[in-house]
Image (cartoon, grey):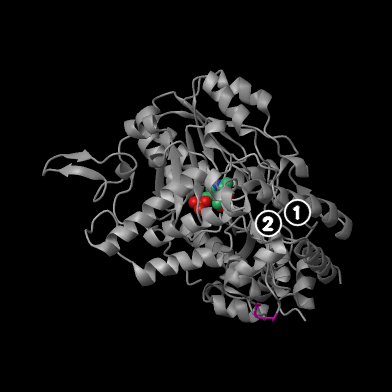
Amino acid sequence: MDDLYRDYILEHYRHPHNFGVLDAPTASYEGSNPLCGDRITMMLGISDGIVREVAFTGRGCAISQASASLLTDEIKGKTVEEVEGMTPDDLLELIGIEISPARLKCALLSLDTVAHALADEAAEKAEPDGSASAPSSTSA
Amino acid sequence: MADLATTGPTSQAAPARLDPYRLRGDFPILSTANRFGKPLVYLDSAATSLKPLAVIEAVDGYNREYSANIHRGIYEMAERATGAYEETRVKIARLINAPDPHEIVFVRNATEAINLVAYSWGRRNIGRGDTIVLTEMEHHANLVPWQLVVQEMDGDLEFVPITDDGILRLEVYEVLLHLRPKLIAFTHVSNMLGTVNPVREMTEMAHAAGALVLIDGAQAVPHMPVDVREIGADFYVFSGHKMLGPTGSGALWARRELLEAMPPFMAGGDMIREVHLRRSEWNEVPYKFEAGTPDIAAEIGMGAAADYLMNLGMEAVRVHEQDLARYALDVLPREVPGIELYGPAAELRGGVVSFNLPGIHPHDVAQILDRSGICVRAGHHCTMPLHERFDLAATARASFNVYTVPEEIDALAVGLREVTRIFDR
Ligand SMILES: Cc1ncc(COP(=O)(O)O)c(C=O)c1O
């Protein structure tokens, strides 16, 4: 009866995939929706331009946590470029339920946090040779 | 009860009980259904109240019949608009027992009223090292404007802490008063905990220490008798849209001497007596603070709302909503296993009940309740520091008004059990 709270969403919420911490992430970022108190820390292990490992911790509503669980499954093994190219619509399709406007922020927090982690990493890489410019906002 | 409307909230006649079932007919929105065909169970009145026909018609009447600007035209329609607008000032003064309608300044909402005082009075009277005392339970509207003042003027903020039951710790307040603060600003009723604060006692203590007092009445004026003379406050603010009136209406009350000494907050038309190219003379109080064309229709609507409430009798409104709070505090823990409730006992609270279901985010709670047509607020309700105080990311909140009936609290209990069922399956 309840579209939003399909079994698989609740299953991801109760038993999120990739929940935990990486010992030595190459990129990480803590994202939050202060308005609702959702909070996610994304950790990525990147080598040769590929996301080899990913983990997240956090607390929040079922939508934000299930979204992070699904997203981390999706990006593992992808190239950084592919991940950077993911749009909010890609993530919403992955989540597969209809999200009301009021809950979009919850659903998209995970992707937003990944984008920030990647942007920070790119900025750090650019730093040593002095050519660093502030990362323009990522496609997400 | 018609005489109550003229004698005001100080009338000590035994309060008639209010019949919420009958007056629900006055609120057209209550006969609507949501997209699932479920009738509306509106439990978010602390965010904004529903509007009775009398208010809708007052706004409509202005727009249809006499939508002229005020204080300007010579023709009959303009006089009618000015008359209705100024009549609202009289009604609002009566509602809070202000001694003089000219002490009522119309603003868009409580937030604007507090900002007006912060900019105009605050920047004149708060200097380096001066202290403003607030409480841990303030709405952001009564916190952030003061943060700006003390940052700019190099002053300090102090906060009266609360107990785990959500009651202000007056023994700490007393100690803070030794700092000789210039201003104490606190809410009359907490929009998260529902706590009704001892405003009169706190005002007396502040005055004895030489401080002025601003009271945020956004959650009090709609729900209980408020008598600014009895309280003895210096500034009192509230919003029209939480007291059955339209959005865009609100009021600041302040003692006349204070208003007269304060510089204008915004400048422009209507607030001046004489304008020359290089200087102007201010209009008298309260017009000095009402620059530009106000939301005339909304303020007139707030006047109709004040009439509506005074007709019910504020004492009856208070009794009704306290009964609802008592009922909710009794029924919810019994019917919804594990529910956590915040705030004091019913004797000390208004019609506000904040809660959590263990392990379930309030957003999810609110979303599932929405399927049953039940509207509750989920989030931090513009009280982030208060949520931090309780180490909570967010809460869900049910809040009541004159049209709320116990059956809606029963529906909430059933809805919450459904939430638990969905998350436990
Ligand atoms: C206690 C309190 N103060 C101030 C406000 C601000 O009211 P408004 O948004 O109408 O300015 C609110 C509204 O949520 C409130 O509950």
Where is residue A120 shown, x and y percent of the image?
51, 58
Between B124 and A29, which is closer to the camera in this rendering? B124
Q: Are marks 2 and 1 in contact (CB under 8 Å)?
A: yes
Magenta run includes residue B36: yes
Residue at horizontal 59 percent and vertical 39 percent from the top: B10
Q: Position of residue A99 (x, y in %)?
A: 63, 76
* On screen, residue B135 above or below B404: above
Quarter holding residue A5: bottom right
Q: Which mark is residue B400?
A: 2
Can you say whether B1 is above or below B421 in the image?
A: above
Q: Which chain carries label 2?
A: B
Q: Is residue B276 visible to the viewer in this orientation of the structure?
A: yes
Amino acid type indicated by mark 1: Leu
- Principal SS element in the magenta part? loop
The image's mark for residue B154 is none
Under mark 2, the amino acid is Phe
Magenta segment, which residues?
B33-37
Position of B54 with respect to A12 (left or right) is: left
Question: How would you rate the neighbour count of disc 2 (Cα within 10 Å): few for under 14, some for 14-19, many for 20 or more?
Answer: many
Q: Is disc 2 placed on a helix, strand or loop?
A: loop
Residue shown at the point (64%, 57%) measured from the top left: B379
Marks 2, 1 in one chain: yes
Find disc 1 in the rendering and name its residue: B324
In the drawing, does residue B15 fall left or right of residue A49? right
Residue closer to the observer: A51 or B334: B334
Q: How crowded is mark 1: few (under 14 residues within 10 Å), some or many (20 or more)?
A: many
Q: Does the magenta stretch include residue B199?
A: no
In the rendered image, which quarter is residue B256 located in?
top left
Earlier-in-chain disc, 2 versus 1:
1
